[in-house]
Amino acid sequence: MIAGSGCCDAAAEQRAGLRPLLELRSVRALADRGLSDDELVLVTKLAEATVQAARSRDVLAYRRADVTFHLCLLDLTGDPALSDIARVVLVPDPGCGPGVRESSHLMAGGAREHRELARMLGDGMVAAADQLLRLHLSRLPHAISGGGA
């Protein structure tokens, strides 16, 4: 595989396909119960980390912040088995994905969605948060293959 070429192996695409199965129901349950003030502060801080990485066009920092944000949401569900599985599924292949130029709009859009998702979870907007996460995760195969959002 050529790093930054947008080419990924089938295993990486299969892992991306598992993310909606892991995240949608879990984050919906999290939205249903609501976030405590401390949880909201943490989730917002992690969303902002993706915004900062996107602004600086730092692909590796964005990937780390993105994984940390999504793992935090799953950790907040309180299901350690789910979190353990997610740690395997969410870890990106370092050679996968588009290069910096192609990633800029993908990172900026994803970061905005993280920020909005944090706000929706904090405001108890369950259906809107669910819909946004579905949209966010639907872009994964395109981001991994380099096809754009």
Image (cartoon, helix red, strand yellow):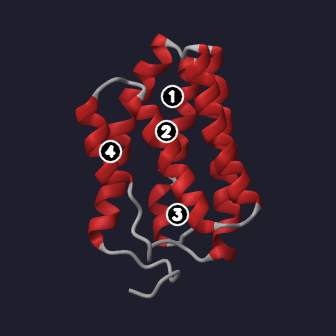
**113 shown above or below 107:** above
Q: Amino acid at mark 3?
A: Ala
User: Mark 2: which secondary structure?
Assistant: helix
Task: Provide residue 128's location: percent of width, then percent of height.
Answer: 59, 25
The reply to whether dot 1 and dot 4 touch (C-beta < 8 Å) is: no
Q: Amino acid at mark 4?
A: Ala
Say whether residue 101 is visible. yes
What residue is at 38 percent from the left and 57 percent from the top?
Answer: 91
Residue on which the image places disc 1: 130
Q: Work out whether mark 3 precedes mark 1 in sequence or the reverse, and give the earlier one.
A: 1
User: Mark 1: which secondary structure?
Assistant: helix
Residue on which the image places disc 3: 143
Q: Find the distance from the CA under tag 1 to the CA under tag 4.
A: 18 Å
Task: Provide residue 88's location: percent of width, then percent of height.
Answer: 29, 53
Q: Find the distance from the CA under tag 1 to the CA under tag 2.
A: 6 Å
Q: Work out whether mark 4 precedes mark 2 in sequence or the reverse, and give the earlier one.
A: 4
User: Mark 3: which secondary structure?
Assistant: helix
